[in-house]
Amino acid sequence: MLFNSFPFLLGFLPVALALHAFIALHRPGWRLPLLVALSLVFYGWWDPRFVPLLVASIGLNWLVARWFGRSRAALLIPLAIAANLAVLALFKYAGFLAGLASVLPGLHDLPRPSLALPLGISFFTFHHVMYLTDLRAGRAPQMSLTRYALYIAFWPQVLAGPLVRWSEILHQFDEKPYARPDAAERIGRGLMLLCIGLAKKVFLGDPLAAYANPVFQAAAEGKVVSVAEAWQGTLAFTFQIYFDFSGYTDMALGLALLFGIVLPQNFDVPYRATSLQDFWRRWHMTLSRFLRDYLYIPFGGNRRGLAVQVAALFATMTLGGLWHGAGLTFVAWGAAHGAGLGAGVLWRRAGLPLPALLGWVLTFAFVALTWVLFRATSFEAALTMFKGLVGLAPVGHGFKWRALLPAALVALLGPTAWAAVHRLPPRPALAVAFAVLLVAVLLRIGDDANYEFIYFQF
């Protein structure tokens, strides 16, 4: 059930809102169980086979937390985290690891398991890891099963984030969303975020997919990609993934607001970054802080010398690349960003100047070029794209720019949706404008095929 689909917008969402309002006003003690039930229905709509996996994951990790609270067994949490990561590896990386092992002598006939990837498994696994790690460190409290289930499975963010810390959401479960003095304003801003996210997806992200997909498909098939096509495909995907994922995040934040929950922001105009470090403080911000707090700092961070810091950055980003996908191209993408972040550390340590404009050019070029590794289906396809980008291919013609130009202007000059909806004062004219925008989005959804969100595959 895609956020940008009629079954969701005209079916699930209105019913869920009506049920939530009734329960919150008349049976407030049932509000959290209702949200858990809605989350399981939403998740099961995709594939009911994986609901037992999600339920078992929640139940077992909650039992581990309770057991740890009673026994304080030192190895219990590390073993639970290892088990969570093992389940993730089984579904997401079994075939990839078997493929790597098959190059070893005597293992070339090793079977490659092909398991269906449960949607959101990477995200809810990381939520388990965050909570269990903080619990072991004495920072997290014990939760009831209902609260823990809602923290893990809350439906606006269960499939593709943002990655939410327990401390950001747990206290909100006790609030009475319709008794707040700003309840109506929250609902209005939630609807605005939903509309903006939908518009970003269907009016900017999806048209760019039509520019990028044929080019990368041609590269995957071994065809020659011209210079014009390579730049068109690379720039189109650069902006497509931003509008696709940030649009999803805007929708998730808006939907959560409609149900009385504030989720953390995930994007802050990342393509205006003037360094790679700045980019990762603006792009997928909740993943960046997860990697920082649960990988980079445990690896040594910046407190054990320059060599350890550079190595920790490289290892963290390489693992971050592997998290995105079971393929060596994803590993290479992460490693490239790790090397780039390390180079930035060395540059700053040397005290060398970098004008802001030059920093922006270098950062945007690096990010756009490395997106090729992220999007390409193989190193051969990526090499074909890079040949076109550097001019080792026919020049070609017919560079498509009509969807690229407005996308670039919005991504580089426009504010975040979160900032925009909080700056706009409530006015009847504003409500009419967003109603018109929603109608336009619905007409577009009915007219064109919908693309799934890119991050659903991770």
Image (tube, helix red, strand yellow):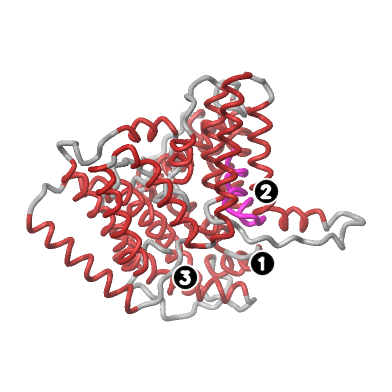
Closer to the camera, 216 or 272?
Answer: 216
The three-letter code of the residue at mark 2 reads Ala
Percent of width and height locating residue 270: 38, 48
The three-letter code of the residue at mark 1 reads Glu
Percent of width and height locating residue 411: 32, 56
- What secondary structure is the stretch in magenta mostly built from? helix
Snapshot quadrant of residue 217: bottom right
Look at mark 2 in the image and give the residue it sits on: 89
* Quadrant where the N terminus is found in the figure: bottom left
Q: Residue at x 65, y 34 (%)?
A: 80
Taking the image as shown, residue 425 lies to the left or right of residue 225, namely: left
Look at mark 1 in the image and give the residue it sits on: 380
Taking the image as shown, residue 403 lies to the left or right of residue 218, namely: left
Compared with residue 423, is residue 302 higher up or lower down, i.e. above or below? above
Q: CA distance from mark 2 to mark 1?
A: 26 Å
The residue stretch that appears in magenta: 316-331
Closer to the camera, 114 or 104?
Answer: 114
Q: CA distance from mark 3 to mark 2?
A: 30 Å
Task: Tell which tag, 3 or 2, sits nearer the viewer.
Answer: 2
Q: CA distance from mark 1 to mark 3?
A: 17 Å
Instruction: Name the element at disc 3.
Output: helix
Percent of width and height locating residue 372: 54, 61
**Mark nearer the N terminus (1 vs 3):** 3
**Mark nearer the N terminus (2 vs 1):** 2
Q: Residue at x 51, y 29 (%)?
A: 350
- In the rendered structure, are the residues bearing label 2 and label 1 in contact, judged by CB atoms less than 8 Å apart? no
The three-letter code of the residue at mark 3 reads Ala
Q: Residue at x 31, y 62 (%)?
A: 198
Look at mark 3 in the image and give the residue it sits on: 212
